[in-house]
Each structure stands twice: as structure tokens, then as C-alpha cells.
Image (spheres, rainbow, N blue to C red):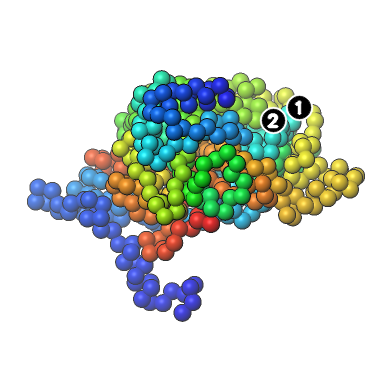
């Protein structure tokens, strides 16, 4: 699995520059950290251009890292947005993580790439307060409209 | 006034917040001089299969657009994961897909056992598969009866719910509970199978197939049912993949993708079973796929009964929670581990893992992040129904409300699965 992860890292960085950091995880899903300003391009590349593409957006969510004690080997991050992709041809998941700072909690929306990202981004906004620029209608899906605060924050 | 009070002004404000305003969604109020009707389907409606509100934009009878509103069933399951220990969280998972019971436990524990590095022994794996397939059948029986009722047949639901009762008797005999057993444990299952378990399963395996044949005659071959489901709500394999659709909804489009075969877990690679697929991805094909899946699940259960391995029903890994009781009663170290793991909780190593299975409705995955404590740092529950309900607007534009009701039934979602 590490060999596969290294190959994917090569394919991505060969195409889009070297800011791609690999993280080892306990489940052997290749996991990469990508910078905020690169992630839109990386995801489009993974969906449309890479060999045996990752055509399915499996999941999109976030983690509030501010109280995490053990983050060895991971880039500094207040909030991490995680994109889980699935390639049916490779029969493999892929995890892309983006580090977000607390005072600039926003990311470009990936709804132009996957229409299904719509509700997932709304849920991240609802639960974590991370805004998605360019989202068609960023309204809380789960909590009531009048709710103040973002429940999954620590 | 305190925070848990609802004075009249607050009630009015909350109700106003729920008012549907088409402009907010970029909808116009009229087309070619005739006004649209904006109608609420739900949140209380038998056709939505739960508390789901669909704001319909209607041009006469034709649906121009649908805005689904979810969140009525949100109970903060992901936040509860940050409060409960790895072991005490198991009953919460039962209630995510409330028809799936033990299937939810399996998804969650697949992730926990990856974190802990536990290999589940063979007997525990086969017991898990046997119960998981029984719950798949139960979930599909609910879908079957309610789907027939959506189309207008009032009786089949009573028959399928009666079949569920037979299955619940088996589950209650083994686990002690019916719909929410919370019976799997980190490292295996809660207890061994009771005496007489084989006969219960063999009786059920004899009992169900003739019933399925009868339902085939009453439901699937009924000309009104076929007229209302064929050609309705169809999408292609590529559209399904783009929308994140998995499970029977994806297989009905023609792609034989089943995570039990493609990424086997819990010993599924040892079993012989087929993956039914459809052709056109419409409501009728989705129905056919689920019915055939029930037959294949019976096949798997029969293989489990015929080839149940001997051995422990739980691993002897130190993180197995709780440890096997005999050991607890025998030596003090195990007793200490037992006490700490059921009270404080077992300490999972630092790391993260995704554990995903083929649940009854599609791919159900738990993404767990551990910070080396007795409690999960982040529990992300990826559910199939969340992705499926998002496809509703695309599937129902241009159709009529009765078609929408049939599509809702054919997608087979559960509100607790969407909202968690």
C-alpha cells in the first residue's frame, strides 16, 4: 500500500507541484496533505485526468484539531477538511487532507467538480463553521436555521 | 427565561425560520404567466419514510424542482462519539441505520479493530456474517412492504413484517434484543451462540423462500406496480458514481459492485454468493436487485450454519473489550483490564482508520481518529442514505408527485442514516 501511495504522490506532484505531504495511517488508505490553494486543482486532476481516476467523492468532512495532542508528522492545522475519494478501477480509497487556520476558515467549494459535494459542504459549514466559497446555497442542513454556533467544534 | 424554554415569540421566530422562501433557493415564482404552487411534502408524510421535508415547486401536477430539507432526525451521533468510550459507543451505532442493527456495529468495529490491530477469530467472523446477513434481509423486508404500500398495495407490508417477526425471534434468542442488539464487541461478539441456534436458522431458511415467491406474484408481477416503477427515476452508472451512490441503487444500473466481494471483510471472501444487478437503473430494477439480494443472503446464512467453525467467539488481544469472562474470573490482570475497559474504556492507539462495509442500503463507513485516549477524538459516520437523498431533485424534475413517492421508496433510505 505504501508503494501505491508513493506512486500516487509522484503522479500528483509531477502534475501539480511538490506541496504534497504523505501521512501514514493505520488503515493503509493513501493519505495526503494538500495546500488550501492547490486542493481544487488536485481534486479535479484526481477525478478527471489521472490514470484510473477517483470518480467517486466518497465523503467530505472535517476535524477540529485544536485539542489534539498527538499530531507527529502532520502539518499544523486548526481545522482539517478531509476528502475521501474512491476509484472503482483501482478499487482503492484516497484521502486528501487540507489544513485550515482558525482565523481564515474557508475553502473553495468543489461543487463544480462533484455536484454531490453540495450537502457535504453544507454539513461541514453547519458543524464546524468552515465556509465554502462559491457554494450555491450554504445553509445549515442539520441544525435549525436559528442555531448559533458550530456543534462539532471542540 | 432559560435556554430550554420556548416562549411564544421564540416559537413564532422558529416557525418563520422554517417557512420556505423560493427566492432563497434561486427559484422563480412563475413561468410563462402561470404561477407555481409551492407544496410541502412532509416532514410528516407516510411517503417520505421518516421526517423528511420536501419543498416542491409545482407547475400544475408537474414537479419543476424539489428541495429536500433534512435535519429533523439529527441526534448528534458524531458528537456522542466524542463523549462515549470506544466500547460504550456501540449501541449508538445500532440506531444510525435503525433497520440495520448489527450491520452498523460491524461497520464501526471494522474501523476500531483496524485502530487496535485486532484480528477477529474465525468463529466470531462467521457469527458476525450470519447475523449481518439476517439483518440485511430484515432491512430489505421493511423496504419491500413499504415500497409496495407506496405504490398502493396495502397488504404486503403486513406479510413482510410478519416475516420480520420470525427473524426477530432468532435475534432475540441469540442477542437478547430485537432491532438494536448492540451485540458485537471490539474483538468479536458478546457471547457464544445458544444451544439450538442451528434449528432456528434452518427453519427460517426453509420458511422465507416460498414467501418471497408469493410476494413476487403479488407485487413484482402486478401490472400496476410495473407501470408505476418501470422507466421511473432511472440514472446511469456514471451518474450514480458521480453522485456517490452505492449499494443496490448502484447495482441496479448494471455495475456489479459490492464491497463484500471487492474489499472483503469479516471473512466474506470464503462465502459463495452472487451479486444481482439490474439493467436500466429504474425503480423496478432497484426492487429486483434487493429481492434477489435477500435470496443470496439466505444462501450465505446457510453456508454459515453448515460450516460454523469452532473456537473462541472473541479475540484474546489485550484491547478486546470486554475480555472473555472465564479469563476475567481466572486471573487478576484480566480482571483489571476488564474493569477498566468497561468503565473507563479501552485505550486505542493514536492514529486514524476508515472501516467501511456493504450495509443494507449501500456503503457505510466509520472514519475514526484516535488521540490515544479511551474516547474517540473524531467519529465521522459516512452513510449511504445521505448521498442517495441528494439525488432526489435530479431524479424527479419533470415527473409527477406519485412518481416522486415511488422514487422515494425505491431509493431505500432511512432518516436516521441521513441525519445521524
Residue B414 is at least partly visible in this image: no
Q: Residue at x 37, y 40 (%)?
A: A37
The quadrant of the rendering that contains the N terminus of chain A is top right
Label placed on residue B309? 1
The 10 Å Cα crowd at callout 1, few under 14, some 14 to 19, many 20 or more, is some
Q: Quadrant of residue B281?
A: top left
Residue B277 spot, x, y in % from top left: 45, 24
Q: Give the camera-side residue of B418 and B130.
A: B418
* Chain holding disc 2: B
Looking at the image, residue B256 lies above or below residue B171 = above
Q: SS class of the residue under badge 2?
A: helix
Residue B165 spot, x, y in % from top left: 61, 44
Figure label count:
2
Q: Is residue A40 left or right of residue B205?
A: left
Please give the residue where the numbered disc 2 appears in the rendered image: B126
Of the numbered discs 2 and 1, the one sitting upstream in the chain is 2
Alpha carbon separation for disc pair 2 and 1:
8 Å
Looking at the image, residue B234 lies above or below residue B271 = below
Q: Is residue B398 left or right of residue B346?
A: left
Q: Is residue B178 left or right of residue A95?
A: right
Looking at the image, residue B18 lies above or below residue A39 = below
Q: SS class of the residue under badge 1?
A: loop
Q: Quadrant of residue A38?
A: top left
Residue B419 spot, x, y in % from top left: 46, 50
Q: Is residue B292 left or right of residue B81?
A: left
Residue A31 is at least partly visible in this image: yes
Q: Residue at x 35, y 54 (%)?
A: A139
Residue B112 spot, x, y in % from top left: 64, 40
- Label pair 2/1, CB-CB below 8 angstroms: yes
Label placed on residue B94? none
* Chain holding disc 1: B
Residue with the most extreme bottom position: B1
Amino acid at each position: 500500500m505504501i508503494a501505491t501511495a508513493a506512486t500516487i504522490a509522484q503522479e500528483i506532484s509531477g502534475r501539480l507541484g511538490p506541496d504534497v505531504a504523505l501521512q501514514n495511517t493505520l488503515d493503509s488508505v493513501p493519505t495526503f496533505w494538500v495546500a488550501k490553494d492547490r486542493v481544487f486543482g488536485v481534486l479535479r486532476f484526481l477525478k478527471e485526468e489521472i490514470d484510473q481516476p477517483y470518480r467517486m467523492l466518497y465523503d467530505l468532512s472535517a476535524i477540529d484539531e485544536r485539542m489534539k495532542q498527538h499530531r507527529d508528522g502532520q502539518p499544523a492545522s486548526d481545522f482539517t477538511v478531509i476528502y475521501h475519494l474512491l476509484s472503482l478501477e483501482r478499487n482503492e480509497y484516497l484521502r486528501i487532507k487540507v489544513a485550515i487556520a482558525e482565523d481564515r476558515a474557508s475553502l473553495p467549494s468543489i461543487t463544480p467538480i462533484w455536484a454531490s459535494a453540495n450537502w457535504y459542504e453544507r454539513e461541514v459549514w453547519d458543524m464546524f463553521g468552515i465556509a465554502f466559497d462559491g457554494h450555491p446555497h450554504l445553509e445549515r442542513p442539520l441544525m435549525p436555521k436559528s442555531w448559533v454556533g458550530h456543534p462539532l467544534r471542540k | 427565561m432559560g435556554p430550554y424554554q420556548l416562549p411564544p415569540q421564540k416559537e413564532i421566530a422558529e416557525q418563520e425560520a422554517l417557512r420556505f422562501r423560493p427566492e432563497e433557493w434561486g427559484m422563480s415564482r412563475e413561468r410563462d404567466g402561470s404561477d407555481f404552487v409551492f407544496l410541502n411534502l412532509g416532514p410528516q408524510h407516510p411517503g417520505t419514510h421518516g421526517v423528511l421535508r420536501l419543498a416542491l415547486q409545482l407547475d400544475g401536477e408537474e414537479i419543476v424542482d424539489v428541495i429536500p430539507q433534512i435535519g429533523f432526525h439529527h441526534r448528534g451521533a458524531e458528537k456522542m462519539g466524542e463523549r462515549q468510550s470506544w466500547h460504550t459507543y456501540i449501541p449508538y451505532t445500532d440506531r444510525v441505520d435503525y433497520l440495520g442493527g448489527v450491520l452498523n456495529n460491524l461497520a464501526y468495529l471494522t474501523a476500531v479493530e483496524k485502530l487496535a490491530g485486532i484480528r477477529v477469530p474465525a468463529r466470531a467472523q462467521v457469527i458476525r456474517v450470519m447475523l449481518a446477513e439476517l439483518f440485511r434481509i430484515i432491512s430489505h423486508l421493511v423496504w419491500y412492504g413499504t415500497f409496495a404500500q407506496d405504490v398502493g398495495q396495502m397488504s404486503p407490508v403486513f406479510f413482510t413484517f410478519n416475516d420480520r417477526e420470525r427473524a426477530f425471534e432468532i435475534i432475540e434468542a441469540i442477542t437478547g434484543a430485537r432491532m438494536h442488539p448492540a451485540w458485537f464487541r471490539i474483538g468479536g461478539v458478546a457471547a457464544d451462540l445458544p444451544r439450538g441456534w442451528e434449528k432456528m436458522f434452518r427453519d427460517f431458511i426453509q420458511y422465507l423462500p416460498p414467501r418471497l415467491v408469493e410476494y413476487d406474484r403479488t407485487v413484482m408481477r402486478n401490472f400496476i406496480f410495473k407501470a408505476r416503477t418501470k422507466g421511473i427515476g432511472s440514472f446511469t452508472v456514471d451518474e450514480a458514481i458521480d453522485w456517490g451512490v452505492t449499494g443496490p441503487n448502484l447495482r441496479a444500473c448494471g455495475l456489479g459492485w459490492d464491497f463484500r466481494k471487492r474489499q472483503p471483510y469479516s471473512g466474506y471472501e470464503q462465502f459463495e454468493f452472487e451479486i444481482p444487478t439490474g439493467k436500466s437503473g429504474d425503480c423496478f430494477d432497484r426492487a429486483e436487485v434487493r429481492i434477489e439480494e435477500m435470496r443470496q443472503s439466505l444462501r450465505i446464512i446457510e453456508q454459515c450454519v453448515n460450516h460454523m467453525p469452532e473456537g473462541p467467539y472473541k479475540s484474546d488481544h489485550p484491547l478486546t473489550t470486554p475480555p472473555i469472562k472465564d479469563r476475567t474470573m481466572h486471573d487478576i490482570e484480566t480482571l483489571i483490564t476488564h474493569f477498566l475497559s468497561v468503565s473507563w474504556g479501552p485505550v486505542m492507539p493514536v492514529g486514524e482508520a476508515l472501516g467501511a462495509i456493504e450495509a443494507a442500503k449501500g456503503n457505510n463507513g466509520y472514519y475514526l481518529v484516535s488521540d490515544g485516549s479511551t474516547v474517540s477524538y473524531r467519529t465521522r459516520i459516512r452513510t449511504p442514505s445521505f448521498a442517495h437523498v441528494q439525488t432526489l431533485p435530479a431524479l424527479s424534475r419533470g415527473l409527477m408527485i406519485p412518481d416522486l413517492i415511488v422514487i422515494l421508496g425505491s431509493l431505500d433510505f432511512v432518516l436516521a442514516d441521513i441525519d445521524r
